[in-house]
Amino acid sequence: MLQLQRIREHKKDMVKALAKRNFDAEAMLDGILHLDEKRRNLQTDLDNTLAASNKLSKEIGMLFKSGKAGEANALKEKTAGLKELSKSLSDDLNDTAEELNNLLYQIPNIPHKSVPAGNSEDDNEEVFTAGDIPELQKDALPHWELAKKYDLIDFELGVKVTGSGFPIYKGKGAKLQRALISYFLDKNTDAGYTEVQPPLLVNEASGFGTGQLPDKEGQMYHVQTDDLYLIPTAEVPITNMLRDAIIAENDFPIMLTGYTPCFRREAGSYGAHVRGLNRLHQFDKVEIVRVEHPEKSYEALDEMVEHVKELLNELKLPYRILRLCGGDLGFTAALTYDFEVFSTAQDRWLEISSVSNFEGYQANRLKLRYKDENNKNQLTHTLNGSALALPRLLAGILENYQTDKGIKIPEVLVPYCGFEIID
Protein backbone atom coordinates (compact mmCIF):
# COMPACT_ATOMS: atom_id res chain seq x y z
CA MET A 1 0.00 0.00 0.00
CA LEU A 2 1.34 3.42 -0.95
CA GLN A 3 2.10 5.87 1.85
CA LEU A 4 -0.23 8.85 2.12
CA GLN A 5 2.59 11.31 2.75
CA ARG A 6 4.30 10.15 -0.41
CA ILE A 7 1.09 10.63 -2.39
CA ARG A 8 0.67 14.14 -0.96
CA GLU A 9 4.22 15.11 -1.90
CA HIS A 10 4.73 13.26 -5.20
CA LYS A 11 1.32 12.76 -6.81
CA LYS A 12 2.36 13.90 -10.29
CA ASP A 13 5.44 11.66 -10.28
CA MET A 14 3.30 8.72 -9.14
CA VAL A 15 0.77 9.25 -11.93
CA LYS A 16 3.61 9.22 -14.46
CA ALA A 17 5.27 6.13 -12.94
CA LEU A 18 2.02 4.15 -12.72
CA ALA A 19 1.35 4.90 -16.39
CA LYS A 20 4.22 2.46 -17.07
CA ARG A 21 1.82 -0.19 -15.73
CA ASN A 22 -0.87 1.11 -18.09
CA PHE A 23 -2.67 2.23 -14.94
CA ASP A 24 -4.42 5.63 -15.01
CA ALA A 25 -4.04 6.69 -11.39
CA GLU A 26 -4.82 10.40 -11.42
CA ALA A 27 -8.53 10.24 -10.55
CA MET A 28 -7.97 7.63 -7.84
CA LEU A 29 -5.08 9.54 -6.29
CA ASP A 30 -7.19 12.71 -6.30
CA GLY A 31 -9.94 10.76 -4.54
CA ILE A 32 -7.43 9.50 -1.98
CA LEU A 33 -6.15 13.02 -1.28
CA HIS A 34 -9.73 14.29 -0.90
CA LEU A 35 -10.60 11.53 1.57
CA ASP A 36 -7.31 12.07 3.40
CA GLU A 37 -8.09 15.76 3.87
CA LYS A 38 -11.62 14.92 5.01
CA ARG A 39 -10.25 12.34 7.47
CA ARG A 40 -7.74 14.78 8.93
CA ASN A 41 -10.39 17.48 9.31
CA LEU A 42 -12.73 15.02 11.04
CA GLN A 43 -9.92 13.95 13.34
CA THR A 44 -9.23 17.58 14.27
CA ASP A 45 -12.93 18.24 14.93
CA LEU A 46 -13.18 15.08 17.02
CA ASP A 47 -10.07 15.94 19.04
CA ASN A 48 -11.39 19.45 19.69
CA THR A 49 -14.82 18.13 20.69
CA LEU A 50 -13.33 15.57 23.08
CA ALA A 51 -11.05 18.22 24.57
CA ALA A 52 -14.03 20.57 25.10
CA SER A 53 -16.05 17.73 26.65
CA ASN A 54 -13.20 16.85 29.04
CA LYS A 55 -12.77 20.50 30.02
CA LEU A 56 -16.49 20.84 30.66
CA SER A 57 -16.53 17.66 32.76
CA LYS A 58 -13.80 19.09 34.97
CA GLU A 59 -15.75 22.34 35.36
CA ILE A 60 -18.86 20.41 36.34
CA GLY A 61 -16.89 18.49 38.94
CA MET A 62 -15.50 21.69 40.42
CA LEU A 63 -18.98 23.26 40.53
CA PHE A 64 -20.42 20.27 42.42
CA LYS A 65 -17.54 20.45 44.89
CA SER A 66 -18.25 24.15 45.38
CA GLY A 67 -21.90 23.46 46.08
CA LYS A 68 -23.12 25.02 42.85
CA ALA A 69 -25.28 22.11 41.76
CA GLY A 70 -27.61 24.29 39.67
CA GLU A 71 -24.83 25.61 37.50
CA ALA A 72 -23.33 22.11 37.25
CA ASN A 73 -26.62 20.57 36.10
CA ALA A 74 -27.04 23.32 33.51
CA LEU A 75 -23.63 22.47 32.02
CA LYS A 76 -24.52 18.78 31.91
CA GLU A 77 -26.85 19.47 28.99
CA LYS A 78 -23.90 20.88 27.06
CA THR A 79 -21.88 17.77 27.88
CA ALA A 80 -24.61 15.53 26.47
CA GLY A 81 -24.58 17.51 23.22
CA LEU A 82 -20.79 17.22 22.96
CA LYS A 83 -20.93 13.47 23.55
CA GLU A 84 -23.52 13.08 20.81
CA LEU A 85 -21.39 15.19 18.47
CA SER A 86 -18.22 13.22 19.26
CA LYS A 87 -20.01 9.92 18.50
CA SER A 88 -21.21 11.28 15.17
CA LEU A 89 -17.72 12.55 14.31
CA SER A 90 -16.17 9.23 15.35
CA ASP A 91 -18.57 7.28 13.12
CA ASP A 92 -17.85 9.60 10.17
CA LEU A 93 -14.12 9.29 10.83
CA ASN A 94 -14.25 5.48 10.83
CA ASP A 95 -16.32 5.39 7.64
CA THR A 96 -13.96 7.83 5.91
CA ALA A 97 -10.87 5.89 7.04
CA GLU A 98 -12.37 2.64 5.73
CA GLU A 99 -13.25 4.26 2.40
CA LEU A 100 -9.74 5.68 2.19
CA ASN A 101 -8.10 2.31 2.88
CA ASN A 102 -10.33 0.57 0.34
CA LEU A 103 -9.19 3.06 -2.30
CA LEU A 104 -5.52 2.73 -1.29
CA TYR A 105 -5.78 -1.06 -1.67
CA GLN A 106 -6.70 -0.55 -5.34
CA ILE A 107 -3.49 1.31 -6.26
CA PRO A 108 -0.59 -0.96 -7.31
CA ASN A 109 3.01 -0.40 -6.31
CA ILE A 110 5.17 2.19 -8.04
CA PRO A 111 7.47 0.48 -10.57
CA HIS A 112 11.22 0.84 -10.09
CA LYS A 113 12.89 3.17 -12.60
CA SER A 114 14.54 0.17 -14.31
CA VAL A 115 11.18 -1.47 -15.16
CA PRO A 116 10.70 -1.33 -18.95
CA ALA A 117 7.50 -0.01 -20.45
CA GLY A 118 5.24 -2.59 -22.05
CA ASN A 119 1.80 -4.12 -22.18
CA SER A 120 2.32 -7.87 -21.71
CA GLU A 121 4.84 -10.69 -21.28
CA ASP A 122 5.89 -10.12 -24.90
CA ASP A 123 7.49 -6.85 -23.78
CA ASN A 124 9.58 -8.31 -20.95
CA GLU A 125 13.32 -7.68 -21.20
CA GLU A 126 15.72 -10.62 -21.38
CA VAL A 127 18.72 -9.77 -19.18
CA PHE A 128 20.59 -13.09 -18.89
CA THR A 129 20.80 -16.55 -20.46
CA ALA A 130 22.83 -19.60 -19.46
CA GLY A 131 23.19 -23.26 -20.34
CA ASP A 132 23.14 -25.16 -23.59
CA ILE A 133 19.87 -26.48 -24.95
CA PRO A 134 20.39 -30.25 -25.32
CA GLU A 135 19.81 -32.07 -28.58
CA LEU A 136 17.30 -34.82 -27.92
CA GLN A 137 16.59 -37.97 -29.87
CA LYS A 138 13.95 -37.70 -32.59
CA ASP A 139 11.31 -39.51 -30.54
CA ALA A 140 11.75 -37.25 -27.45
CA LEU A 141 8.60 -36.96 -25.38
CA PRO A 142 6.99 -34.15 -23.39
CA HIS A 143 6.97 -34.66 -19.63
CA TRP A 144 3.35 -35.84 -19.40
CA GLU A 145 4.19 -38.73 -21.75
CA LEU A 146 7.41 -39.47 -19.86
CA ALA A 147 5.49 -39.46 -16.57
CA LYS A 148 3.11 -42.07 -17.99
CA LYS A 149 5.84 -44.16 -19.60
CA TYR A 150 7.90 -44.45 -16.39
CA ASP A 151 4.91 -44.37 -13.98
CA LEU A 152 6.12 -41.18 -12.23
CA ILE A 153 3.00 -38.99 -12.11
CA ASP A 154 -0.64 -40.02 -12.48
CA PHE A 155 -2.72 -37.11 -13.72
CA GLU A 156 -5.88 -39.19 -14.29
CA LEU A 157 -5.81 -40.64 -10.76
CA GLY A 158 -5.50 -37.11 -9.41
CA VAL A 159 -8.65 -36.19 -11.32
CA LYS A 160 -10.43 -39.15 -9.72
CA VAL A 161 -9.35 -38.24 -6.18
CA THR A 162 -9.78 -34.46 -6.40
CA GLY A 163 -10.03 -32.99 -9.89
CA SER A 164 -7.97 -31.59 -12.73
CA GLY A 165 -4.75 -29.92 -11.63
CA PHE A 166 -4.09 -32.17 -8.62
CA PRO A 167 -1.56 -34.80 -9.82
CA ILE A 168 -0.39 -37.79 -7.81
CA TYR A 169 3.38 -38.39 -7.77
CA LYS A 170 4.43 -42.05 -7.58
CA GLY A 171 7.57 -44.10 -7.01
CA LYS A 172 10.67 -42.43 -8.37
CA GLY A 173 8.57 -39.41 -9.35
CA ALA A 174 7.68 -38.83 -5.68
CA LYS A 175 11.30 -39.43 -4.61
CA LEU A 176 12.59 -36.95 -7.19
CA GLN A 177 10.07 -34.39 -5.98
CA ARG A 178 11.20 -34.90 -2.37
CA ALA A 179 14.84 -34.74 -3.44
CA LEU A 180 14.32 -31.34 -5.07
CA ILE A 181 12.63 -29.96 -1.94
CA SER A 182 15.43 -31.16 0.34
CA TYR A 183 18.12 -29.91 -2.03
CA PHE A 184 16.60 -26.43 -2.24
CA LEU A 185 16.11 -26.16 1.52
CA ASP A 186 19.69 -27.24 2.16
CA LYS A 187 21.04 -24.73 -0.36
CA ASN A 188 18.91 -21.96 1.13
CA THR A 189 19.93 -22.64 4.72
CA ASP A 190 23.60 -22.89 3.65
CA ALA A 191 23.15 -19.39 2.17
CA GLY A 192 22.01 -18.01 5.53
CA TYR A 193 18.23 -18.44 5.38
CA THR A 194 16.47 -19.78 8.48
CA GLU A 195 14.09 -22.62 7.68
CA VAL A 196 10.50 -22.35 8.93
CA GLN A 197 7.46 -24.56 8.45
CA PRO A 198 4.45 -22.21 8.22
CA PRO A 199 0.69 -22.93 8.23
CA LEU A 200 -1.02 -23.74 4.94
CA LEU A 201 -4.07 -21.62 5.77
CA VAL A 202 -4.06 -17.92 6.60
CA ASN A 203 -6.60 -15.43 7.87
CA GLU A 204 -7.93 -12.44 5.97
CA ALA A 205 -5.50 -10.00 7.65
CA SER A 206 -2.57 -12.03 6.31
CA GLY A 207 -4.03 -11.98 2.80
CA PHE A 208 -4.32 -8.19 2.96
CA GLY A 209 -0.87 -7.89 4.53
CA THR A 210 1.04 -9.30 1.56
CA GLY A 211 -1.38 -8.05 -1.09
CA GLN A 212 -3.20 -11.21 -2.20
CA LEU A 213 -6.41 -9.58 -0.99
CA PRO A 214 -8.34 -7.95 -2.45
CA ASP A 215 -6.39 -8.11 -5.74
CA LYS A 216 -6.19 -11.93 -6.14
CA GLU A 217 -9.18 -13.06 -4.10
CA GLY A 218 -10.66 -14.94 -7.08
CA GLN A 219 -7.47 -17.01 -7.41
CA MET A 220 -7.45 -18.23 -3.79
CA TYR A 221 -9.32 -21.15 -2.26
CA HIS A 222 -11.52 -19.83 0.54
CA VAL A 223 -12.71 -21.93 3.49
CA GLN A 224 -15.86 -19.92 4.13
CA THR A 225 -16.98 -21.52 7.38
CA ASP A 226 -13.75 -20.50 9.14
CA ASP A 227 -12.98 -17.51 6.87
CA LEU A 228 -9.50 -18.86 6.11
CA TYR A 229 -7.60 -19.03 2.81
CA LEU A 230 -5.38 -21.80 1.44
CA ILE A 231 -2.01 -20.22 0.73
CA PRO A 232 -1.05 -19.49 -2.91
CA THR A 233 2.64 -19.31 -1.85
CA ALA A 234 4.70 -19.59 1.34
CA GLU A 235 5.42 -15.88 0.96
CA VAL A 236 2.07 -15.14 2.61
CA PRO A 237 2.45 -16.93 5.97
CA ILE A 238 6.21 -16.37 6.23
CA THR A 239 6.07 -12.62 5.61
CA ASN A 240 3.05 -12.26 7.91
CA MET A 241 5.06 -13.77 10.75
CA LEU A 242 6.46 -10.21 11.03
CA ARG A 243 3.16 -8.35 10.70
CA ASP A 244 2.77 -5.50 13.25
CA ALA A 245 6.42 -5.87 14.28
CA ILE A 246 8.98 -3.17 15.04
CA ILE A 247 12.50 -4.47 14.58
CA ALA A 248 15.89 -3.04 15.48
CA GLU A 249 18.28 -1.91 12.75
CA ASN A 250 20.83 -4.51 13.84
CA ASP A 251 18.24 -7.25 13.14
CA PHE A 252 18.71 -6.74 9.38
CA PRO A 253 18.71 -8.76 7.26
CA ILE A 254 15.94 -11.17 8.23
CA MET A 255 16.23 -14.18 5.89
CA LEU A 256 13.66 -16.99 5.95
CA THR A 257 12.96 -20.02 3.79
CA GLY A 258 10.19 -22.59 3.82
CA TYR A 259 8.66 -25.41 1.81
CA THR A 260 4.90 -25.63 1.39
CA PRO A 261 2.31 -27.00 -0.96
CA CYS A 262 0.64 -24.07 -2.73
CA PHE A 263 -2.96 -23.77 -3.90
CA ARG A 264 -4.25 -21.64 -6.75
CA ARG A 265 -7.59 -21.78 -8.49
CA GLU A 266 -6.07 -20.61 -11.80
CA ALA A 267 -9.56 -19.84 -13.08
CA GLY A 268 -9.90 -19.68 -16.85
CA SER A 269 -6.62 -21.49 -17.68
CA TYR A 270 -7.17 -23.91 -20.54
CA GLY A 271 -5.35 -25.21 -23.62
CA ALA A 272 -2.26 -27.21 -24.56
CA HIS A 273 0.09 -24.68 -22.90
CA VAL A 274 -1.24 -25.72 -19.47
CA ARG A 275 -1.00 -29.47 -20.05
CA GLY A 276 0.65 -31.79 -17.51
CA LEU A 277 2.71 -29.91 -14.91
CA ASN A 278 2.57 -26.61 -16.76
CA ARG A 279 -0.39 -25.28 -14.74
CA LEU A 280 -1.66 -26.86 -11.53
CA HIS A 281 -4.09 -26.08 -8.72
CA GLN A 282 -1.80 -27.69 -6.12
CA PHE A 283 1.97 -27.66 -6.41
CA ASP A 284 5.10 -27.66 -4.25
CA LYS A 285 7.41 -24.68 -3.85
CA VAL A 286 10.37 -23.64 -1.72
CA GLU A 287 10.33 -19.91 -0.98
CA ILE A 288 12.91 -17.39 0.21
CA VAL A 289 11.81 -14.20 2.01
CA ARG A 290 13.94 -11.25 3.10
CA VAL A 291 13.22 -8.20 5.23
CA GLU A 292 15.81 -5.51 4.59
CA HIS A 293 16.83 -1.97 5.42
CA PRO A 294 15.56 0.25 2.56
CA GLU A 295 19.12 1.23 1.63
CA LYS A 296 20.11 -2.43 1.18
CA SER A 297 17.06 -3.96 -0.52
CA TYR A 298 18.26 -3.77 -4.12
CA GLU A 299 21.61 -5.22 -3.16
CA ALA A 300 19.63 -8.01 -1.48
CA LEU A 301 17.55 -8.49 -4.65
CA ASP A 302 20.74 -8.98 -6.67
CA GLU A 303 21.93 -11.54 -4.10
CA MET A 304 18.65 -13.44 -4.41
CA VAL A 305 18.94 -13.49 -8.19
CA GLU A 306 22.48 -14.86 -7.94
CA HIS A 307 21.29 -17.50 -5.48
CA VAL A 308 18.60 -18.79 -7.85
CA LYS A 309 21.13 -18.74 -10.71
CA GLU A 310 23.41 -20.97 -8.65
CA LEU A 311 20.60 -23.50 -8.13
CA LEU A 312 19.90 -23.70 -11.86
CA ASN A 313 23.59 -23.82 -12.75
CA GLU A 314 24.05 -26.81 -10.43
CA LEU A 315 21.04 -28.52 -11.98
CA LYS A 316 22.64 -27.83 -15.39
CA LEU A 317 19.44 -26.62 -17.01
CA PRO A 318 19.23 -24.02 -19.80
CA TYR A 319 17.52 -20.92 -18.43
CA ARG A 320 17.03 -17.22 -18.93
CA ILE A 321 16.16 -14.25 -16.73
CA LEU A 322 13.58 -11.63 -17.69
CA ARG A 323 13.02 -8.20 -16.18
CA LEU A 324 9.23 -7.82 -16.19
CA CYS A 325 7.74 -4.85 -17.99
CA GLY A 326 5.19 -2.55 -16.39
CA GLY A 327 2.24 -4.34 -17.97
CA ASP A 328 3.33 -7.76 -16.66
CA LEU A 329 4.54 -6.65 -13.22
CA GLY A 330 2.71 -8.07 -10.20
CA PHE A 331 0.39 -5.74 -8.30
CA THR A 332 2.59 -5.41 -5.20
CA ALA A 333 6.05 -5.56 -6.80
CA ALA A 334 8.34 -2.65 -7.62
CA LEU A 335 10.73 -4.84 -9.64
CA THR A 336 10.54 -8.52 -10.60
CA TYR A 337 12.92 -10.89 -12.33
CA ASP A 338 11.39 -14.05 -13.80
CA PHE A 339 13.46 -17.20 -14.32
CA GLU A 340 12.47 -19.51 -17.15
CA VAL A 341 13.80 -22.99 -17.98
CA PHE A 342 13.80 -24.11 -21.59
CA SER A 343 11.77 -27.24 -22.24
CA THR A 344 13.38 -28.90 -25.23
CA ALA A 345 10.61 -31.43 -25.75
CA GLN A 346 7.93 -28.71 -25.71
CA ASP A 347 10.19 -26.17 -27.48
CA ARG A 348 9.16 -23.39 -25.11
CA TRP A 349 10.25 -21.49 -22.02
CA LEU A 350 8.65 -22.42 -18.69
CA GLU A 351 8.54 -19.93 -15.81
CA ILE A 352 9.96 -21.52 -12.65
CA SER A 353 10.76 -18.56 -10.35
CA SER A 354 9.96 -14.92 -9.69
CA VAL A 355 12.24 -12.81 -7.50
CA SER A 356 10.75 -9.48 -6.42
CA ASN A 357 11.42 -6.37 -4.36
CA PHE A 358 8.24 -4.85 -2.93
CA GLU A 359 10.11 -1.93 -1.32
CA GLY A 360 7.85 -0.53 1.44
CA TYR A 361 4.54 -1.46 -0.23
CA GLN A 362 3.92 -4.71 1.68
CA ALA A 363 5.51 -3.32 4.84
CA ASN A 364 2.98 -0.48 4.90
CA ARG A 365 0.13 -3.00 4.75
CA LEU A 366 1.85 -5.20 7.32
CA LYS A 367 2.84 -2.31 9.63
CA LEU A 368 6.32 -3.83 9.55
CA ARG A 369 8.74 -1.16 10.76
CA TYR A 370 12.17 -0.59 12.22
CA LYS A 371 13.63 2.04 14.55
CA ASP A 372 16.03 4.36 12.73
CA GLU A 373 19.03 6.14 14.27
CA ASN A 374 16.70 8.87 15.54
CA ASN A 375 14.44 6.26 17.19
CA LYS A 376 11.67 6.95 14.67
CA ASN A 377 9.59 4.22 13.07
CA GLN A 378 10.32 3.64 9.38
CA LEU A 379 9.00 1.06 6.92
CA THR A 380 11.24 -1.90 6.09
CA HIS A 381 11.55 -3.30 2.59
CA THR A 382 10.34 -6.85 1.86
CA LEU A 383 11.49 -9.24 -0.87
CA ASN A 384 10.66 -12.78 -1.87
CA GLY A 385 11.49 -15.36 -4.48
CA SER A 386 10.84 -18.94 -5.52
CA ALA A 387 13.88 -21.11 -4.85
CA LEU A 388 12.31 -22.94 -6.49
CA ALA A 389 8.80 -23.81 -7.76
CA LEU A 390 8.80 -27.50 -8.61
CA PRO A 391 6.23 -28.42 -11.30
CA ARG A 392 7.71 -26.76 -14.39
CA LEU A 393 11.23 -27.31 -13.08
CA LEU A 394 10.49 -31.03 -12.78
CA ALA A 395 9.02 -30.92 -16.29
CA GLY A 396 12.25 -29.35 -17.54
CA ILE A 397 14.38 -31.99 -15.83
CA LEU A 398 12.33 -34.89 -17.20
CA GLU A 399 12.32 -33.50 -20.73
CA ASN A 400 15.91 -32.18 -20.96
CA TYR A 401 17.52 -35.17 -19.23
CA GLN A 402 15.72 -37.89 -21.22
CA THR A 403 17.86 -40.34 -23.22
CA ASP A 404 17.17 -43.48 -25.19
CA LYS A 405 18.07 -45.45 -22.03
CA GLY A 406 15.90 -43.48 -19.59
CA ILE A 407 15.88 -40.19 -17.71
CA LYS A 408 19.17 -39.23 -16.11
CA ILE A 409 19.11 -37.54 -12.69
CA PRO A 410 21.04 -34.26 -12.28
CA GLU A 411 24.27 -35.04 -10.46
CA VAL A 412 23.53 -32.78 -7.46
CA LEU A 413 20.25 -34.63 -6.82
CA VAL A 414 21.64 -38.19 -6.85
CA PRO A 415 22.63 -38.13 -3.11
CA TYR A 416 19.10 -36.95 -2.28
CA CYS A 417 17.08 -39.46 -4.33
CA GLY A 418 19.43 -42.46 -4.26
CA PHE A 419 19.35 -43.32 -7.96
CA GLU A 420 21.09 -42.02 -11.09
CA ILE A 421 18.54 -42.88 -13.75
CA ILE A 422 14.84 -43.51 -14.18
CA ASP A 423 14.42 -46.50 -16.51
Image (tube, rainbow, N blue to C red):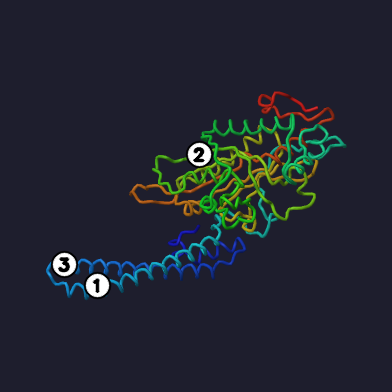
What's the residue at 26%, 75% (across, down)?
77
- Asked if residue 114 is positioned above or below residue 158 in the image, the reply reads below
**Rounded to the nearest whole Å, what is the CA distance between mark 3 and mark 2?**
59 Å
| Disc 3 crowd, CA 10 A, few/some/many (<14, 14-19, 20+) | some
Label 1 residue SS: helix
Q: Amino acid at mark 1?
A: Lys
Q: Amino acid at mark 3?
A: Met
Of the image marks 3 and 2, the number of the one nearer the N terminus: 3
- Asked if residue 233 is positioned above or below residue 110 in the image, the reply reads above
| Disc 1 crowd, CA 10 A, few/some/many (<14, 14-19, 20+) | some
Do the residues under discs 3 and 2 have CB atoms within 8 angstroms? no
Percent across and percent down for residue 309 are 63, 38
In terms of depth relative to the viewer, which is nearer, 85 or 11? 85
Q: Which residue is mark 2?
A: 255
Percent across and percent down for residue 348 are 76, 46
- Asked if residue 170 is positioned above or below residue 326 in the image, the reply reads above
Q: Which mark is residue 134?
A: none
Q: Amino acid at mark 2?
A: Met
What's the residue at 56%, 62% (across, down)?
18
Q: Which residue is mark 1?
A: 76
**Rounded to the nearest whole Å, what is the CA distance between mark 2 and mark 1?**
59 Å
Label 3 residue SS: helix
Percent across and percent down for residue 267 are 70, 54
Q: Is residue 137 left or right of residue 265?
A: right
Q: Is residue 24 left or right of residue 82?
A: right
In terms of depth relative to the viewer, which is nearer, 200 or 34? 200
In terms of depth relative to the viewer, which is nearer, 127 or 53? 53
Q: Which residue is mark 3?
A: 62
